[in-house]
Image: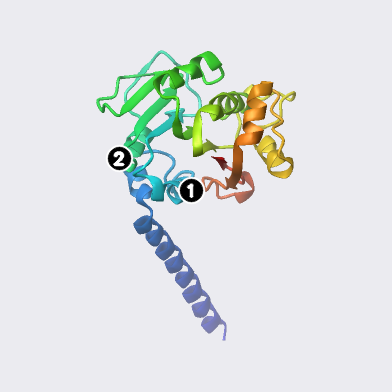
Amino acid sequence: MNWRRKIIGIFQEFKSICEYFKYNFKQYRSNRLIGLAIRTGTDKANSGHGYVRIYDFFLNERRHTIKTLCEIGLLYIRHQTDETQIRKTTPSLNMWRQYLPNAKIIGFDICHFLPPTDSQIVIVQGDQSKREDLKKIIEIEKDLDVIIDDALHASKHQQITFNYLFKYLKSGGLFIIEDLHWQPSEYEDEKNPKTIDILREFKRTGLWLSTLASEEERRIIEEGIKNIFIFDSLNNPDITKSCDGIAVIEKR
């Protein structure tokens, strides 16, 4: 009976939809970051990349003991046309401030932001491809619990930032690089491997092959990395285009 099969098919599809919403509701209730991400307007929420599922997994148990978090890149607009324009909102910093009640939150961006009204939030202006600008972060805090790179997503910029700042990550700290599945093509250089390929190679061989690292930086990184975990982004229905979107690098 075709009509019976159709009814059964509709029922099974409805059941699957209900299970999907049930799963997401459980995620919302159990994940402290999802609600904060939605309220503050960051694209880390499930409506964007869904990275909050990763952050809460790694940070929830230590969120009251984390003393310093630094995020590189404070806007989620892909291209900034006017670096001199003064920005007011910092969605992700506001989220981290609420999630990590005892932490100093340091933001770093090439754009100019108004000074935060919260004394626990500091914003530094600079270019992440310049070590002399990244040094401004260390002048504020030399021991960092968590570092997040959510800036230009260009391989060169990601690697210079990681090569320089990994030294200042505390033992047991986390360095997180977002959006490894997408790089602006105009900034990519064939002479230097993509960051995701360097991370995969390190997992395989224990060698850090960034051509942008000094010998000292390479030694510190190769001796200091304990684990690398790579997860997918959830921002694209085509899952082949969102594989390996975010890396969590744990220091020994």
Q: Quadrant of the N terminus?
A: bottom right
Which residue corresponds to mark 2?
101
Q: Residues within 10 Å of mark 2 (few under 14, many from 20)?
A: some
Q: Quadrant of the C terminus?
A: top right
Q: Is residue 201 above or below residue 212?
A: below
Q: Is residue 245 above or below residue 27?
A: above
Q: Is residue 195 visible?
A: no
Q: Amino acid at mark 1?
A: Ile
Q: Is residue 80 above or below residue 8?
A: above
Residue 178: give x, y in percent of width and height: 53, 37
Q: 112 left or right of 58? A: left
Q: Is residue 202 above or below residue 231?
A: above
Q: 47 left or right of 198? A: left
Which residue corresponds to mark 1?
54
Asked if marks 2 and 1 touch (Cβ < 8 Å), the reply is: no
Q: Identify the residue at horizontal 55%, vertical 28% (top origin).
A: 167
Q: Residue furthest left?
A: 117
Determine the CA span between mark 2 and mark 1.
19 Å
Q: 7 left or right of 94? A: right
Closer-to-camera residue (178/198):
198
Q: Residue furthest bottom?
A: 1
Q: Identify the residue at horizontal 50%, vertical 32% (top origin).
A: 169
Find numbered disc 2 in the image and state the secondary structure of the residue it sits on. loop
Q: Amino acid at mark 2?
A: Pro
Residue 123: give x, y in percent of width and height: 37, 22
* Badge 2 or badge 1: first in the primary sequence: 1
Q: Which mark is residue 35?
A: none
Q: Quadrant of residue 28?
A: bottom left
Closer-to-camera residue (7/123):
123
Please name which of the two marks, 2 or 1, marks the residue nearer to the observer.
Answer: 2
Q: Residues within 10 Å of mark 1 (few under 14, many from 20)?
A: some
Residue 91: give x, y in percent of width and height: 35, 34
